[in-house]
Amino acid sequence: MRVVLESLRFTAIVFLFFTLIAGMLYLVLIHADVNPDKYDWALVFVAGMFGIALYRYKGWGKVFDKKVLWTTLLFSLLMLVILPNVGPTQLYESKAAYSYGFPFHFLTLYVEHGSPFLIPNLLSGGLSGWSMNVGFLFNFLILYFLCRFILEKRR
């Protein structure tokens, strides 16, 4: 239960940082006559870094087994990159929505003439938008407890 609560705290903190940074960056870029939609992908990275920095500074997250945590994160990212989207949702003639994540989809890319795999869609130049939801939290929790169970069985 402590792992679930700690994961929810991290998600809430990253969401709060994402909202604050996005609001400030949007205002700055609008006043500088720059399209803020081109730089929204960087917000997730920056908010995650601020969340991790706050966690380290406050000493939170001690309930996680470090070996299991990093194994789970690495496995989650590998599954995101390796597993294709088997059935994209066709939005317009040339635009489709590709959803990624296993077992719950959490990342959706809106791409023109896309590929079922994540990396080609990111590098294709036809990416017109993206959305992310809390499915990553559920995927992380499932994989974390599964890895922890497997590692405890081996000991």
Image (cartoon, helix red, strand yellow):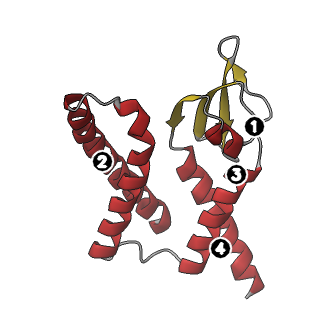
Q: Residue furthest top?
A: 93
Q: Position of residue 139 (x, y in %)?
A: 62, 52
Image coordinates of residue 57 in percent, x first then y, are 28, 74
Mark 3 touches mark 4? (CB < 8 Å): no
Instruction: State the CA–CA distance, disc 1 to disc 3.
Output: 10 Å
* Labels 1 & 3 near each other (Cβ < 8 A): no
How many C-alpha atoms fall within 10 Å of the one at disc 3: few (<14), some, or many (≥20)? some
Would you name the residue on which mark 2 appears?
16
- Find residue 85 and name its label: 1
Sequence-wise, which precedes: disc 3 or disc 4? 3
Which residue is at 69% across, 81% downward? 152
For label 1, count other residues whose C-alpha is less than 10 Å away and answer few (under 14), some (14-19) or many (20+). Answer: some
Q: Which residue is mark 4?
A: 148
Q: What residue is rendered at 63% in x and 27% in y?
A: 111
Please name the residue that numbered disc 3 is placed on: 81
| Residue drawn at point x = 69 percent, y = 16 percent | 94
Amino acid type, label 1: Asn
Q: What residue is shown at x 51% (from left), y 44% (from top)?
A: 134
Cα separation between marks 4 and 1:
28 Å
Which amino acid, by three-letter code, is at mark 3? Val
Left or right, 28 with reference to 45: left
CA distance separating discs 3 and 4 = 23 Å
Secondary structure of the residue carrying tag 3 is helix
Quadrant location of the C terminus in the rendered image:
bottom right
Q: Earlier in the sequence, mark 4 or mark 1?
A: 1
Q: Position of residue 127 (x, y in %)?
A: 58, 31
